[in-house]
Amino acid sequence: MDSIASGMKGHDMTDEAFQHPNLSEHYGPAFDIGNLAHQLNDAGDHIQLAAALYEATALPPIELRRLMRGLARRESAASFESRRELAVRRLRALLRLNVEDARVVARSFDDAFIDLPAEWRERSREVEFAVIQNALHLSEFVSLTSVLPWLRDVEAARGLLAHLSESTETDEARLHQTPLTALIPR
């Protein structure tokens, strides 16, 4: 776990190749897709989830999307309160990854809904919106604007920013150091 955690931001992973028995692809760290799916589902907090998501970024896009579809199904099938907790954990896990890996995971999670009922995608988006609005700090929102596909849209970010509650001076200072400065209503 230490090598995973140290490699999440700086990609210090070893270069040893591993050929997965179910695929013809070569991967850096040795892992089992079934075990990785369990790690994603059993993560107790956003740090454990981030470690599993980081490992998942080594997968080919189709396999990553398959894992994200499992995560999307789990969130969608949960009760509202559990769904909210799972979304907070997932969004905070994305923030522990570097921006490129976080974008890949977020895009795969978004794409996973292609094969699922449309109302699940809408429900997931509503929960993400509520989580950003009520459970995350403004600084986390600012960081997510460069990660989440739907939030990277300027109009979506502006609309959500208008609904955010009061922030601290530290959050305001951080916001002014970002490209979102243009979104702040004057």
Image: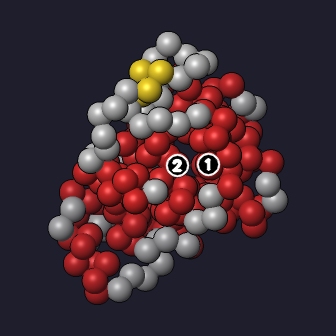
Judged left or right of residue 101, residue 38 is right
Label 1 vs label 2: CA separation? 6 Å
Most distant residue in the left direction? 177
In terms of depth relative to the viewer, which is nearer, 143 or 89?
A: 89
Picture quadrant where residue 71 is located = top right
Picture quadrant where residue 153 is located = top left
**Residue shown at 32%/57% (left/top)?**
6
**Residue shown at 31%/44% (left/top)?**
13
The answer to whether 109 is drawn above or below residue 81 in the figure is above
> Dot 1, how many residues are within 10 Å of its Cα: few (below 14), some (14-19), or many (20+)?
many
Label 1 close to label 2 by CB (< 8 Å): yes
> Dot 2, how many residues are within 10 Å of its Cα: few (below 14), some (14-19), or many (20+)?
many
Where's residue 16, x and y in %? Answer: 34, 32
User: Badge 1 is on which residue?
Assistant: 40
In terms of depth relative to the viewer, which is nearer, 123 or 43?
A: 43
**Residue shown at 20%/70% (left/top)?**
176
Most distant residue in the bottom direction? 169
Where's residue 116, x and y in %? Answer: 72, 30
Judged left or right of residue 106, residue 89 is right
**Residue shown at 52%/48% (left/top)?**
52
Q: Which amino acid does label 2 sit on?
A: Ala
Is residue 111 visible to us here?
no
Where's residue 170, x and y in %? Answer: 28, 83
Is residue 48 visible to us here?
yes
Where's residue 31, x and y in %? Answer: 53, 36
Q: What residue type is labelled 1?
A: Leu
In terms of depth relative to the viewer, which is nearer, 104 or 133?
A: 104
The answer to whether 110 is drawn above or below residue 169 in the figure is above
Q: What element carries label 2?
A: helix
Judged left or right of residue 172, residue 83 is right
User: Badge 2 is on which residue?
Assistant: 52
Lower position in the chain sequence, tag 1 or tag 2? 1
